[in-house]
Image: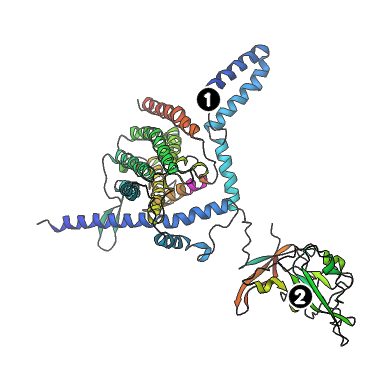
Amino acid sequence: MPDINTLIEVALIIVKVIVVSLILFTLPIPLTWIERKVAGHIQVRLGPFRVGPHGILQPVADMIKLMFKEDIAPDKADKWLFKFAPLFAMVPAFAVYAAIPFGDKITIPIINKEVTLYISDMNVGILYILAVGGISVYGIILGGWASNSKYALLGGIRSSAQMISYEIALTFSCIGVVMTSNSLSLLDIVKLQSGTILGFIPHWNIICQPIGFAIFFIAALAEINRIPFDLPEDEGSLAAGYHVEYSAMKFSFFMLTEYLAMVTASVLTVILFFGGWNAPLFMPEIPIFWFVAKVGFFIYLFMWIRFTLPRYRYDQLMTIGWKILLPLSLLNILLTGLFLL
Amino acid sequence: MGKLHLNTLTGNRQTFFVAANLSAFFKSPMNWQTTDRMQNMTNILKKIFFIDFIKGLSLTLGYEVSKSVTMRYPDEEKWLPYQRFRGLHTLNRDAQGRELCVACELCAKTCPTKCITVVPMEDDTGIGISDRIAKVYEINLVRCMFCGLCEDACPTTAIRMGRDYELACFSLDCAAADKKRLLAPAHPFPFQEGIQKSPLLGGDKGVGQEFEGGYVVGARLERNKQGISIKPDLTRKKRWW
């Protein structure tokens, strides 16, 4: 018979998992609206405006539409893989959040119990996130292959080649951060970024690792398939790329994955390079506010970049990945090592 | 951002630049200092600090905070055309309220698409300005190309093209505009000689000739038993751009 404290701990973890999953499931709803609004305003339009005030109910309308659309599978598709590919893509996107800390710990006022704001503090946190995040590409490849369509297949192949090229640079750019903080745990990495250098510069890794940040950011853009690296779903040449044959809820699972990947990339950027939940200079510490604010800024930045830059050609993408980012990331590790010595 | 391929950092172009710089150096050291090499260095620095990238982002940010040019047409605002606009025709009346049309059929004859049908009749009860008025005056709006030749042909300035352009409808009934629809109602601002356009915007929209066009006015969409109509609100007006 386990004692009452263990039961409470278990219950707490279950509650946290449910809360995080619910937040992640509902997060793409406002994000699609925000993305379309950002697109509209950058192009001097209004964006969605008809459903609800300022089109705020547009994603709800879209959701209803996606739910009631006919779920079409091509005749010659591999039915089983075609059905499960969206899940293969979606599950890793959720699984990543098992290791992501949103804050240190807060005390719930009434029951006076300390709650940690993360599901688990893995001592190999960053390794786990990069590994599980990398699995997500299987969904894309399988979806592209199972559709039995040339566009989808090309999208899937492009995606796999792009992932291989940029995963290396992404991981290497994280090594610099790991070296300076001497830990793979994201919690330790954030804790080391509190305080200031010389009293007026925040002790964030962006200051110590500017090259690492640049590489990480560019590689993350490529990892989450966003412009200027959205070759797998290149509308111009591949119609919609790997999800061209998908409709209804299966398609929306791919969309969900994409938005979650964007959130994950923003969260990782904030945790690794922008001090996590540490407040900027001389600002009061509010438990989760600064984390959300920083993540929000990076999500906005991803959208902003999407409607600013054109898409790279495929050979340019490969050139940037292998000839520039990879040597630079190696150089970054070398420089970090020299500084640490 | 298009220049961010960094191909000047690597490969043959770099060697070429170095060679060009060296030869320039041996020819005249001053030029080497100030032109080629400076240019080359600036380009590399630009790439390192993502200058073009930041320029692009600031440009889109500028557009993001700028005001949108979208006109929310049926619900909020509508475009009021210039006075010279050629929209739905009107048959005008004079200051006493008599019809100006004398059914001379010149408009029908000059019409390139032959969309105007005029049937004259005699009438001495004072409906028209003479004893000849139009029994039937019908314009087939589907065939009309709004060229305005009927306006030019009319000797009594009876037919004038108005500013009403909302001619879409749900049935074929409205494709032909009959006399009842075209005839301008008696209006406190009657048609005057010298003014080349109709006193009304057309139909019963109530926008008079005196209103100069070329801007966006407030509007609202009204649904009633007669159908859908757009009521302009002339008190709110602004330039579109």
Q: How many numbered markers are drawn?
A: 2
Could you say which is closer to the camera, residue A157 or residue A150? A150
Separation of disc 2 and disc 1 at Cα?
A: 73 Å
Q: Amino acid at mark 1?
A: Leu
Q: Residues within 10 Å of mark 1 (few under 14, many from 20)?
A: some
**What coloring was used for the rendering?**
rainbow
Q: Which residue is mark 1?
A: B9
Residue, x 61% and y 14% (percent of image)? B22
Residue A265: x and y in percent read 40, 44
Where is residue A229? Give x, y as percent.
47, 39
**Nearest-to-viewer mark from 2 and 1:** 2
Q: Quick check: B88 above or below A36?
A: below
Q: Was residue B166 drawn as part of the magenta stretch in this picture? A: no
Q: Is residue B104 above or below residue A302?
A: below
Residue located 51% across and 41% down the image: A237
Q: Quadrant of the C terminus of chain B?
A: bottom right
At label 2, the amino acid type is Leu
Q: Is residue A200 visible?
A: no
From the viewer's side, name the closer residue of B61 and A67.
Answer: A67
Q: Chain of mark 1?
A: B
Q: Find residue B182 and name its label.
A: 2
Magenta stretch mostly in which secondary structure? helix
User: Hey, which quadrant is residue A131 in on the image?
Assistant: top left
The reply, left or right, for residue A26 in relation to residue B100 is left
